[in-house]
């Protein structure tokens, strides 16, 4: 069973703790592997190093990439001791796997997250965004940490374009009414104030549903 704790492209849709915990229970019961895809949700983006930690479960395999190298292309697969014990020399291979530059980048990213207390900053920033940014066209906010989806009452592409006029970069998703916020882990309170202010002057679509 492969799952994303927060489905990024779907609009930062966060799976409920009950659902994720049920996945762990059922896969264990039936002898199936539980694989967490944390390419988007991992490396601090959800307020812990990995989103599964928020749910308090341990998958059998976990994939990581993107933010893992802080801009240097790399990826990693973490697995349980039981699975690792089944691997032998030559079972896994990669042309660039384990290269010194990528490995150094990974170490530097982890050091920065820990030394700059970025996990706590992500958690504080999420609270602030949820408190301040439910304004203008935003109906509700979903997601986790700094992988958030602003559910809006008008097309997200229009809101994205309007925010560009305020020098704010956001993203859309497969849901046309969800705007994605994937802010850097070093986000500051002033940035959130700026986002809230910009959203507040975007007029909500009062004709929605008429």
Image (cartoon, rainbow, N blue to C red):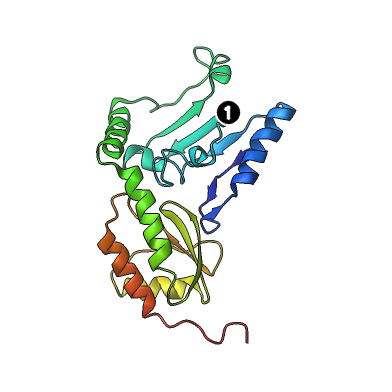
Residue at position x 59%, y 49% from top?
Answer: 15
Please count the marks in the image.
Answer: 1
Q: Residue 74, percent across and down?
A: 38, 35
Q: Residue 43, percent across and down?
A: 40, 40
Seen from this angle, which residue lies furthest right? 30
Q: Quadrant of the C terminus?
A: bottom right
In the image, residue 68 sits, relative to residue 77, either above or below, namely: below
In the image, residue 122 sits, relative to residue 57, either above or below, namely: below
Horizontally, residue 96 falls left or right of residue 6, namely: left
The image quarter in which residue 118 lies: top left
Residue at position x 48%, y 28% from top?
Answer: 78
Q: Quadrant of the N terminus?
A: top right
Residue at position x 58%, y 15% from top?
Answer: 86
46 vs 64, nearest the viewer: 46
> Mark 1 packing: few (<14 Cα in 10 Å), some, or many (20+)?
many
Q: Residue 27, percent across and down?
A: 69, 32
Residue at position x 48%, y 30% from top?
Answer: 77
Horizontally, residue 59 falls left or right of residue 204, namely: right
176 vs 192, nearest the viewer: 192
Secondary structure of the residue carrying tag 1 is loop
18 vs 95, nearest the viewer: 18
Q: Residue 2, percent across and down?
A: 61, 39
127 vs 95, nearest the viewer: 127
Could you tell me if residue 182 is visible in this image?
no
The image quarter in which residue 116 lies: top left
Could you tell me if residue 158 is visible in this image?
yes
The residue singled out by tag 1 in the image is 60
The image quarter in which residue 17 lies: top right
């Amino acid at each position: 069973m492969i799952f994303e704790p927060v489905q990024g492209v779907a609009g930062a849709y966060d799976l409920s703790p009950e659902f994720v915990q049920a996945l762990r229970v059922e896969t264990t019961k039936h002898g199936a592997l539980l694989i967490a895809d944390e390419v988007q949700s991992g490396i601090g983006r959800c307020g812990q190093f990995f989103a599964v930690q928020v749910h308090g479960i341990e998958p059998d395999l976990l994939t990581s990439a993107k933010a893992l190298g802080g801009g240097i292309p790399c990826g990693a697969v973490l697995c349980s001791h039981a699975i690792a014990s089944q691997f032998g020399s030559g079972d896994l291979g990669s042309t660039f796997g384990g290269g010194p530059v990528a490995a150094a980048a990974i170490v530097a990213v982890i050091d920065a997250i820990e030394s700059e207390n970025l996990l706590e900053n992500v958690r504080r920033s999420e609270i602030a965004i949820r408190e301040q940014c439910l304004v203008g066209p935003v109906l509700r906010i979903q997601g986790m940490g700094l992988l958030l989806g602003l559910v809006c009452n008008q097309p997200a592409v229009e809101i994205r374009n309007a925010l560009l006029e305020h020098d704010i970069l956001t993203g859309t998703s497969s849901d046309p009414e969800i705007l994605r916020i994937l802010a850097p882990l070093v986000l500051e309170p002033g940035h959130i104030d700026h986002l809230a202010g910009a959203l507040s002057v975007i007029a909500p679509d009062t004709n929605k549903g008429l």
